Structures are given as C-alpha cells and as structure tokens.
Image (cartoon, helix red, strand yellow):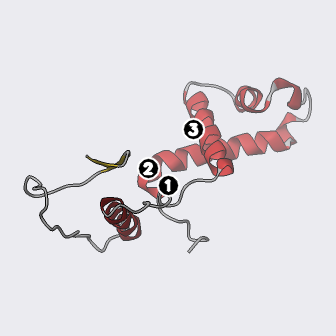
C-alpha cells in the first residue's frame, strides 16, 4: 500500500521499492485494463504532485442506493423473508397494499432487487468498476 497525499494506492512490486528509482507499470491486456490504466494514471499524477482526479467510474447516488437495496433484499431473501416483508422493510409498510399485492409494482420491484442482488454476488466486485455496455 502506497499512501501519497492521503490517497492510498495498491501497488505490487517484484522487489522492495527504492526511493528515487524509476519504475514502470506493467499492465495485462485483459478485461480490467481500462480500470488498471486509470489507477496507474492516478498514481503517476499523485506521485508528481498533481491532483489524482476522480476514482474510476464513481457510482452515482442513485446507483449506490439501488445496489444497497439489492444487497439488503438479497440478505432478507436468504434469511427466509417473503417478498412482501422485504418490500415492507425497503419501502415502508404504508406503501404496501392489503389487497392486490400479486400485481403491485412494488412486488415486481422487490423481486427485481433480489434478482439484482443475486447477479451482483455472482458477478464479483470488479464488475462495479467496469463501465456497463451502455456507457461505452
């Protein structure tokens, strides 16, 4: 871990680093190349006294909230919670109708959140760092 101006950079070196030495970044051309190039550029900027810039693909508030809700929904589902009880916890009991639950929008939304949580857990954390196909 290399800390420069309060920002932590994860760096792997074959040998112990030496102050004042010149270093090169070796980046594999794989599915994570874009994120690695961005991280290497931020490290270079910080090491040269420049502002590193924003983190790679910072999540919007709306995206963070949706991911958080998906993880909460998945956790509740894995603990045996019904879609109705999950919806009540996420959206409030007052918004859940006594009747017509089977066709209510919040039921469908809760099911999508649980499925989204499952996909998130299966895809791994690096998927959050990559731009979606739509953003490219």
Residue 21: x %, y % from top left = 12, 64
Determine contact: label 1, label 2, CB under 8 Å: yes
Question: Does residue 67 appear left or right of residue 102 in this picture?
Answer: left
Q: Residue at x 62, y 41 (%)?
A: 70
What secondary structure is marked by label 1? helix
Q: Residue at x 70, y 29 (%)?
A: 86
Q: Residue at x 15, y 57 (%)?
A: 13
Residue 80: x %, y % from top left = 59, 25
Report the disc number at residue 128: 1
Q: Is residue 52 above or below residue 93?
A: below
Q: Is residue 96 above or below residue 70?
A: above
**In this view of the protein, which residue sits in the foreground, 80 or 29?**
29
Q: Which residue in the protein does label 2 denote?
A: 125
Mark 3 and mark 2 lie on one chain; the one further toward the N terminus is 3
What secondary structure is marked by label 2? helix
Distance from the alpha carbon under mark 1 to that under mark 2: 6 Å
Q: Is residue 100 above or below residue 28?
A: above
What secondary structure is marked by label 3? helix
**In this view of the protein, which residue sits in the foreground, 96 or 41?**
41
Residue 41: x %, y % from top left = 36, 67
Distance from the alpha carbon under mark 3 to that under mark 2: 13 Å
Distance from the alpha carbon under mark 3 to that under mark 1: 13 Å
Residue 19: x %, y % from top left = 13, 56
Viewer-side label of 3, 1: 1
Q: Is residue 52 visible?
A: yes
Q: Which residue in the protein does label 3 denote?
A: 71
Mark 3 and mark 1 lie on one chain; the one further toward the N terminus is 3
């Amino acid at each position: 871990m290399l800390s420069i101006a309060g920002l932590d950079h994860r760096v792997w070196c074959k040998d112990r680093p030496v102050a004042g030495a010149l270093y090169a970044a070796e980046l594999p051309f794989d599915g994570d190349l874009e994120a690695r190039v961005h991280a290497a550029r931020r490290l270079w900027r910080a090491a040269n006294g420049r502002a590193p810039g924003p983190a790679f693909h910072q999540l919007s508030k709306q995206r963070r909230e949706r991911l958080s809700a998906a993880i909460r929904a998945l956790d509740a589902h894995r603990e045996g919670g019904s879609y109705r009880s999950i919806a009540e916890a996420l959206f409030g009991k007052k918004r859940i109708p006594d009747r017509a639950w089977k066709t209510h929008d919040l039921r469908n939304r809760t099911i999508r959140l649980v499925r989204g949580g499952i996909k998130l857990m299966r895809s791994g954390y690096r998927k959050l760092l990559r731009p979606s196909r739509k953003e490219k």
